[in-house]
Image (cartoon, rainbow, N blue to C red):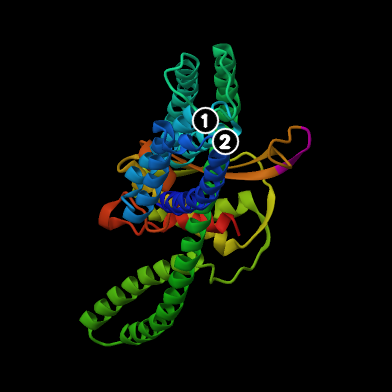
Amino acid sequence: MEEQSWREGTLRKAQRAVLLLGIGVAALTVAVVLSRDAAGLVSATYLCMMAAFAGIGVLEVVAPPYPIRSKVFVALLVLMGWFSVLTFGLAPGPLVVACMSTVAAGVFIGPVALAATLSVNALGILLAGALLTTGMVSPVALYQTHDLMDWAQGSVEFFLTAGGLAVLIHLITLEIARQEASLAQARRLEALGRLAGGVAHDFNNTLQVIFAWSEMLGEHDDSEVVTGAKEIQFAADRASQLTAQLLAFGKRSVWAPANIDLASHVRRWVGSMSRLLPEDVQLATKLTDSPVIHCDPAQLDQILMNLVVNARDAMDGPGRVTITVEEVRAALLPGNSFETESVARLSVHDDGKGIPPEVMGQVFEPFFTTKGRGGTGLGLSIVHSATRM
């Protein structure tokens, strides 16, 4: 969506730039043609060229939807280029217009349109040469050649030069659009994180009152009241876990890093948290090494909790969840295969069917879930956020 919006804005600017530039060039062209061959201003090719230019002005006023607007804009540029070649021959101006249409096709429509427009322009130059050299069209002879081989050479040179330029600009445009979309996504997530953190912080204060009253009710003489108090406290505990996740997502939780023996920490965590899994799901460890890492123990527990719970839900039946701790060699910089250092790797593996390829790119988005009403969609986004802190 952001990429499409970016392209629409760029197309509007391109149309206006062509109109302003075209008005200046048209005025200069009229002056030159009047001084050399006034009859050229009423020739069929010149009038068709000006009609195509006027069509861009009409397109600016009418402003149809983007898909139609982009295709019509490119088509009008192609016509302008071809009729200007018929009018002025192998001149720099007509070739620039033809090149502009090829670039516009790549930027606003896509690589297929770029290739098609490039081919049409190259063949159009060759066809114009055939019409002019056989005398079927009488041009304003500013840059005229009567040798068809010159036109063939011009067509090939245009194909290579304009094609290379169009491909380069197309790739640059794609990268700019991708970065714009990525930046917009990051801004949205940042705003959402601040909102989630603020709401969770205020809600957490309210939960403290609920906890206090549930503890007081738990000391009541009536057994039904005590049972109800336990249910309230259980529900409040669940709500507290959710607010902790929201606070982690909004990065409002306190960051207190310490040196941790990763293998020992995982071993203790597994011993106390195995009860979270059903009896037919086994929680195992594979502690190959015992690296020491510098991180927040609470954040590490949050990461383990979310990964294991997701693994449990992914299996949907009997299975095994394995937590692995090991040391691996990794490059100091991406792509650097010469300098490496030892890093700790913590991984969680389950026997589930895996993540469908069509949703793989969304698993770290907040509130995205495949569990229906049973999931919040915050687990993996919190893991992603915590590992990047």
Residue drawn at the location 41% of the way across and 49% of the way down: 4
Q: Secondary structure at mark 2?
A: helix
- Residue 339 in view, yes or no: yes
Q: Which is the main secondary structure of the residues drawn in magenta?
A: strand
Q: Is residue 207 above or below residue 184?
A: below
Is 341 within the magenta? yes
**Is residue 60 or residue 218 the one in the foreground?**
60
Is residue 195 left or right of 172 when viewed as pictured? left
Q: Callout 2, which amino acid?
A: Arg
Q: Is residue 98 left or right of residue 60?
A: right
Figure quadrant of the C terminus: bottom right
Q: Which comes before the other along the chain, label 1 or label 2?
A: 2
Residue at image position (40%, 55%) is 275
- Label count reads 2
Which residue in the rendered view is the most extreme toward the left?
224
Q: Mark 1 belongs to which amino acid?
A: Val
Residue 271 visible here:
no
| Label 2: few (<14), some (14–19) or many (≥20) C-alpha neighbours in 10 Å | few
Give the residue at mark 2: 36
Residue 45 x/y as whole percent: 42, 32
User: Label 2 near label 1: C-beta < 8 Å?
Assistant: yes
Q: Nearer the viewer, residue 323 or 45?
A: 45
SS class of the residue under badge 1?
loop
Highlighted magenta segment, given as a residue range: 338-342
Residue 131 location (% of width, % of height): 44, 18
Disc 1 residue crowd, few under 14, some 14–19, many 20+, Cα 10 Å:
many
Which residue is found at the position 42% from the left and 41% from the top? 50
Q: Judge whether 257 appears above or below 277 on screen.
A: below
Q: Which residue is mark 1?
A: 140
